[in-house]
Amino acid sequence: MRCPGCSRRCLAWFYRYLPVRFLFLLWLFFTGSFIFVFYTNHSRSGFRKHLVSERGTAENRTAEDRTAENGTAENGTAENGTAENGTSGVTGGANATLASPPVTCPLNRTFSYREDIASPLRIPYQILAGERPRFRKYISIGISSVRRKKENYLLGTLRSVFQQSRESDVEDMVLVVYLADWDPAAREQTAREVSDRFRGQLAARRLLLIASPRAAYPTLEGLKRNYGDSEDRVRYRSKQNADYAFLSNFCTGLARHHLVLEDDVRCARNFLLSVRRKVEASSRPWTTMAFSKLGYIGKLYHGSDLPALARFLLLFYDEMPCDWLLDHFFRSKAQGELLRVRPSLFQHVGSFSSFRGGANSLKDDEFRERAGPSGDNPPAAVSTDMEAFEGNTLEAAYEGLGFFWGRRVANGSHVSVRFREPAALRRVRVLTGSPEHSGDVLRAGLAEVGWAGARGGSLDACQTYRKIGRFVNGTLDVEGPGLGVRGPVDCLRVRVTEDQKEWLILQDLSVWIEKTGNATVKEPTK
């Protein structure tokens, strides 16, 4: 039987007495907390059971896949496998089993951008010769090489890299050669040859020879035959992508910048200095600079981009050749067009391709040839009273970055070099003219060395000079006893002795100094 007014009397009693309200709210809070904790624990328990079930299934599938892959590899019919660090290979082919699901992070570790994406891939490597540098360098140079059957160009390429650079630039460089042969005997033979000829560079930690096991590679069988390529051509270019990916991954952290070369190139004089000057002069963001228009030669990257580059090459390793993937990589990082540097600093010299040993006579017509090895050319102030044409300055000629092209060549005109520190000269070479402008040579002239005396003269000139040689057919090259000079000198001067109507091209001004005794101090590496 309903009580009239009972509800109103209860509410009035509830609001009138404060302890009643407090006890009711406390009961409500504990009841809600109990319900929340109960359902949360129940949900987590179910999730754990599901996760354990899924892991068991995944482990079973992974074990089956590894067993199948090992059996296939023993028969010599597949390239894929599992890396030593537990990274699964990529499976493929018409009869391939399903790939294992992605490995999830442990429940006690949160996702890390640095560790999971931006850090190097955990690829197994074997260091065949050399050691990692102790300090981070300015530039790393990566070369992927396979041993050709007809002719091997690797030794000549390494010689060109070291000879065509100033000593101060070589000290701030590390050269990494990835030996991509799967035949251990071929790798060991190449490693022995390089070690015999470049012992000093290996001991100085400027040269490294590395390799990776075949099992670390993704599959090369049953791939798509894009662009009408034959099956073996697809296999070759796909492996090459993986080779460059493994090389780039290893070089992560070695240097601020990374330069990719092929194993059959010749370098321009002082190419490292040219690369550094171009990077320092760049005023806009960039991902890739190209110092050659051919293949995967002379491509420069930031060292911080190497993990992304390695992942990119592996992600699309079976789609297209590596030089085509290059365009997609820098465009994916919002670089509108390739930043080409001219003239080219590298020339392709190989006549036989690493693919089937076929003929390959590609040449870079924008390569700037420089005669002979690079000199020491210690720090100096240079000057001339001839007018430079179109930015072809004397500084560029002395630093090996270009040539000097001067006009108004008259009797008494000069090119002067004032060394910052006295230099004990071992050899002096000056070459004038060029194949395109053979008439712009020094018709009559001589070279002199000088001393500043009490150093009361100007910065660019010395007070007393002595002749060391005359130009013959526009060339001067004197060394050793022919210099007729003992001890260090302060200046080197080229002096014109007759008027000439033609302009003057000074394509090479090289100075070699004694390495001991009173030799000048080399410019410190920045």
Image (spheres, rainbow, N blue to C red):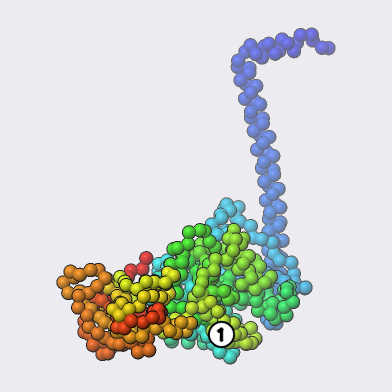
List the single residue furthest toward the right.
1
Q: Tell me the kind of residue under disc 1.
A: Gly
Circle 1: is it few (<14), some (14-19), or many (20+) Cα within 10 Å? Answer: many
Q: Residue 469: horizontal and vertical position, in percent? A: 28, 87
366 or 8: which is nearer to us?
366
Q: Residue 168: horizontal and vertical position, in percent? A: 36, 73
Q: Residue 138: horizontal and vertical position, in percent? A: 43, 67
Determine whether 307 is above or below 348 in the image.
Answer: above
User: In the visual, does 75 lie left or right of 193?
Assistant: right
List the single residue furthest toward the top.
4
Please report the residue visible at 58 percent of the width from the left and 76 percent of the height from the top. Answer: 294
Please report the residue visible at 66 percent of the width from the left and 34 percent of the height from the top. Answer: 34
Q: Residue 339: horizontal and vertical position, in percent? A: 54, 66
Residue 348 at least partly seen: yes
Total marks shown come to: 1
**Where is residue 518, by image quadrant?**
bottom left
Please report the residue visible at 22 percent of the width from the left and 74 percent of the height from the top. Answer: 462
Identify the residue position indicated by label 1 in the image: 350
496 or 24: which is nearer to us?
496
**Where is residue 112, by image quadrant?**
bottom right
Q: Quadrant of the C terminus?
A: bottom left
164 or 46: which is nearer to us?
164
Determine whether 214 is above or below 254 in the image.
Answer: below
Q: Mark 1 falls on what kind of element?
A: loop
Q: In which quarter of the image is the N terminus?
A: top right
**Where is residue 515, by image quadrant?**
bottom left
Residue 260 at least partly seen: no
User: In the visual, does 477 lie left or right of 366?
Assistant: left
Please report the residue visible at 52 percent of the width from the left and 87 percent of the height from the top. Answer: 189
391 or 523: which is nearer to us?
391
